[in-house]
Image (cartoon, grey):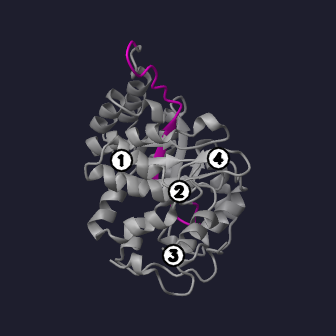
Amino acid sequence: MTNPRTGLASPPSGSIVSRLLAGLFDDAALFPPGDAPMDAALAAYRSRPAALRTMVGRFVVPAARLGELVETLGRAGPRESPDPVALVVTTTVSELPAVVTQLRPPALTHLSPPGATRVEVVGVDVAGVDVAGVGAGARAESTSLRDALALLAAAGLPAGVAASIEVRCDAAQGRPLDELAAAGRQLKLRTGGPRADLFPGGGELARAVVECAARNLRFRCTAGLHHAVRHTDAATGFEHHGFLNILVAARAAVTGAGSVAVADLLGCRDGAVLVDEIGAWSAADAERARALFTSFGTCSIAEPVGDLVALGLLRSDGANSANSAG
């Protein structure tokens, strides 16, 4: 596997690959199955080389560990990178008011101790929202979602802080998405976890992607996307979606493809087919895909980057695939 910290070449500026990968990876090293210690996770994020800085945009931290993050930054050595720590805070509906209070001035200033790496809070992810009872005969499905949206509106997040609400793939349709879009919030889709039932089927994910495209509702993904292409995990037997599949599916949905065609793209297990598809894209196609599918959280950066090198979309020898030229 390619070591993304040694010899990885940045995609040519302005190329399709550079547009496609910019800020695609959210560093979720603190979360399972990686479970990295805070000091190691922060050190890796802060010292990432230039090629990774363009791809790894945000550092994800649970709200309960904000204090630990501040302490770790306070005792860390000189900053390795001029870039700030772009922070996404994960929380639950019940914790949300207290968390937002921490993120507003003047309390926000405690996140950047004097002399430490600057911290910029760029997002809040809200879990624990129950969007229940989709389908015929269902009970009122959006009460908890409306409560979460009302709390976000009342809390008054600082300017520039985006809010995403996690919704199950099987519930990512109809009124919940209408309410998210109307409120100007983003959707967060769970695409994996420690149990097989946390991995949505291809049809479920396809429907969610198409429904988001119909509403211009931006979405992010969490869990299960360590690899570029759909595959079956040899150890667990779980079916994993590929992040490259989702990028290709997002572009298809934005350009009018329906759920069946999008599900076919999500089910593709041939990386060369996906690379050929991307190779035919224009810069506008890449931008359309990323305008819908904004990023995904991964506890490993080496695995997705290694896949991209193996597929020829990234190179470690200073040259990028012909498919990456835009």
Vertical position of residue 257 compared to residue 147: above or below: below
Residue topped by disc 1: 261
Q: What percent of the width, then of the height, locates residue 300? A: 63, 60
Please name the residue that numbered disc 3 is placed on: 312
Q: Earlier in the sequence, mark 3 or mark 4?
A: 4
Question: Marks 2 and 4: in contact by CB < 8 Å?
Answer: no
Question: SS for tag 4?
Answer: helix
- SS for tag 3? loop
Q: CA gap, disc 4 to disc 2?
A: 38 Å
Q: Which residue is mark 2?
A: 269
Estimate how packed mark 2 is, as few (under 14), some (14 to 19) or many (20 or more) residues with alpha carbons within 10 Å. some
For mark 1, does the 10 Å Cα neighbourhood hold few (<14), some (14 to 19), or many (20 or more) residues?
A: some
- Determine whether, in the image, residue 32 is placed left or right of residue 134: right
Q: Eyeballing the image, is 242 above or below 97?
A: below
**Drawn side of residue 202 relative to residue 136, left or right:** right
Give the residue type that dot 1 points to.
Ala
Residue 22 in view (yes/no): no
Residue wearing tag 4: 65
In terms of secondary structure, what is the magenta stretch mainly?
A: loop
Please say whether residue 121 is one of the residues in the magenta stretch: yes
Name which residue lies at 52% across and 87% down: 318
Identity, as a three-letter code, of the amino acid under mark 3: Gly
Question: Which circle's residue, 4 or 2, is located before the other in the chain?
Answer: 4
| Range of magenta residues | 113-137
- Picture quadrant where residue 209 is located: top left
Whole-Å distance between the Cαs marked 2 and 1?
Answer: 15 Å
Tag 3 or tag 1, which sits nearer the N-term? 1
Q: Quadrant of the C terminus?
A: bottom left
Identify whether 216 is placed above or below 274: above
Instruction: Give yes or no for residue 62 being in the magenta stretch.
Output: no
Please tell me which of labels 3 and 2 falls first in the chain. 2
